């Protein structure tokens, strides 16, 4: 009976060590990914809003391709939310190269109007430009991001 408990504890210990090792290695790989630039390309104007494309240029300094499984967040100017951003398909950041990741979205006039009214009421117009704030997930590890966007 005691031997079976020792065996179970040994297996649980090995699985835990393996899990922590994989997480550590994945974190090292993700730390090899750096943002080289974040931009916003303005698209066409419609009756409901403006189409925009967020372009993120990631440099992979590792020797391995790194999957970008998810990117979700929002574009904002100060406290005024302009648009939600969601990666629609995974992207692979190639080793030793800069990989552009483009995400299309739109700024709704209705949503913008409501956010602008709220900003006027609360007197919260603070902000020094456009930002993409959210989360990036790669290999099961999620990292919060806050990227300043430049116009292209």
Image (cartoon, helix red, strand yellow):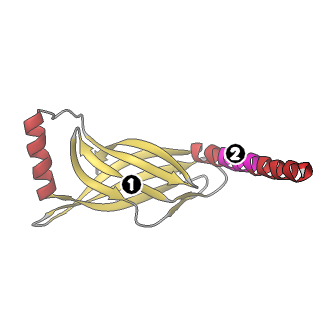
Which residue is at the front of the view, 71 or 46?
A: 71
Residue 144 in percent (x, y) is at 44, 43
Which residue is at the front of the view, 3 or 82?
A: 3
Which residue is at the front of the view, 36 or 116?
A: 116
Let me know if residue 17 is in the magenta part: yes
Q: Secondary structure at mark 2?
A: helix
Q: Furthest-front residue in view?
A: 1
Tell whether 131 sits left or right of 43.
right
Cβ–Cβ under 8 Å for marks 2 and 1: no
Quarter of the view holding residue 52 = bottom left
Q: Secondary structure at mark 1?
A: strand
Which contiguous range is marked in magenta? 16-25
Against 80, is 108 above or below?
A: below
Tell whether 49 sits left or right of 144.
left
Say which label, 2 or 1, has the lower sequence index. Answer: 2
Query: Mostly what secondary structure, the magenta segment?
Result: helix
Q: Which mark is residue 125?
A: none
Which residue is at the front of the view, 89 or 62?
A: 89
Q: Which mark is residue 72?
A: 1
The alpha-carbon separation of the residues under discs 2 and 1 comes to: 26 Å
Residue displayed at 19% across by 32% down: 126
Residue displayed at 22% across by 34% down: 127
Near mark 1 (Cα within 10 A), the count class, few <14, some 14-19 or many ≥20, is: some
Near mark 2 (Cα within 10 A), the count class, few <14, some 14-19 or many ≥20, is: few
Q: Which mark is residue 20?
A: 2
Let me know if residue 146 is in the magenta part: no
Residue 130 in percent (x, y) is at 26, 43
Residue 20 in percent (x, y) is at 69, 45
Residue 39 in percent (x, y) is at 33, 49
């Amino acid at each position: 009976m005691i031997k079976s408990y020792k065996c179970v504890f040994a297996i649980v210990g090995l699985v835990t060590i393996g899990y922590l090792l994989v997480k550590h290695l994945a974190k090292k790989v993700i730390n090899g990914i750096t943002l080289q630039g974040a931009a916003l390309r303005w698209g066409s104007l419609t009756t409901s809003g403006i189409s925009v494309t967020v372009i993120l240029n990631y440099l992979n300094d590792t020797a391995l391709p790194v999957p970008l499984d998810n990117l979700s967040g929002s574009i904002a100017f100060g406290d005024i939310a302009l648009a939600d951003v969601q990666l629609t398909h995974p992207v692979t950041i190639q080793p030793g190269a800069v990989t552009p990741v483009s995400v299309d979205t739109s700024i709704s006039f209705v949503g913008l109007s409501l956010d602008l009214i709220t900003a006027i009421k609360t007197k919260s117009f603070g902000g020094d430009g456009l930002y993409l704030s959210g989360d990036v997930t790669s290999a099961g590890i999620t990292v919060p991001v806050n990227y300043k966007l430049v116009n292209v």
